[in-house]
Amino acid sequence: MRRYPYLILSLAVTWMFLRGSLTILSFVEGLFFGIIAAIITRAIIRPDVVEAFPRVLRRLPAFLRYLGFFIFSVLEGNLDVTYRALHPRSQVHPGILAVDVKGRSELEVTMMANTITLTPGTLTMDVNMEMGLMFVHTINALDMERVREGLKEVERHVRRVLR
């Protein structure tokens, strides 16, 4: 049980939020149920997973920043696409951009590609790991520098979460 304190504490805090009660009693209940869950699942959970849990907690702030960035990007993309669809004079200027992904892990490239695809106005068309390129379609090719900066921002957030 010595390897489980972070897991038990996180379960206790989760219990408090699920109960909607941020009291000492609720925290103690969470500790109790966290300990029971740890005892029941200790034969299932591998030791390397438990040892990696503190590293996951250290990455939590970076993940929360990524999540905020992602939500903002999706909202901004939705507004842009909606504006282009509803305004008769607004035009779509499609273009394809090749993004260098050399030296990135498959997980980093996958997370980048999914983030790009889920953001309205952009789409990951193809990833070629041998060439080290990801091809991204955008509806705003007139301002490619802005698109490149946005993709670099995605890459920075993904790198902070995964490294």
Image (tube, grey):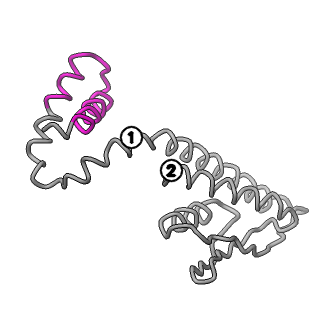
The secondary structure making up most of the magenta span is: helix
Numbered label attached to residue 161: 2
Q: Is residue 11 above or below residue 101?
A: above
Is residue 15 rendered to the left or right of residue 69? left
Residue 47, percent from left and from top: 19, 52
Whether residue 20 appears in magenta in the rendering, the answer is yes
Numbered label attached to residue 57: 1
- Report the amino acid beneath label 2: Val
163 or 90, nearer to the observer: 163
162 or 144, nearer to the observer: 162
**Considering only order in the chain, which callout, 2 or 1, is on the residue closer to the N terminus?**
1
Is residue 35 rendered to the left or right of residue 111? left
- Report the amino acid beneath label 1: Leu
Residue 92, image quadrant? bottom right
Segment tinted magenta in the rendering: 5-32
Numbered label attached to residue 81: none
- Residue at image point 27% right, 47% down: 51
Residue 40, image quadrant? top left
- Distance from label 1 to label 2 (Cα)? 11 Å
Is residue 134 rendered to the left or right of residue 58? right
Instruction: Name the element at disc 1.
Output: helix
Q: Residue furthest top?
A: 24
Q: Quadrant of the N terminus?
A: top left
Check disc 1: other Cα within 10 Å, few if <14, some if 14-19, many if 20+. some
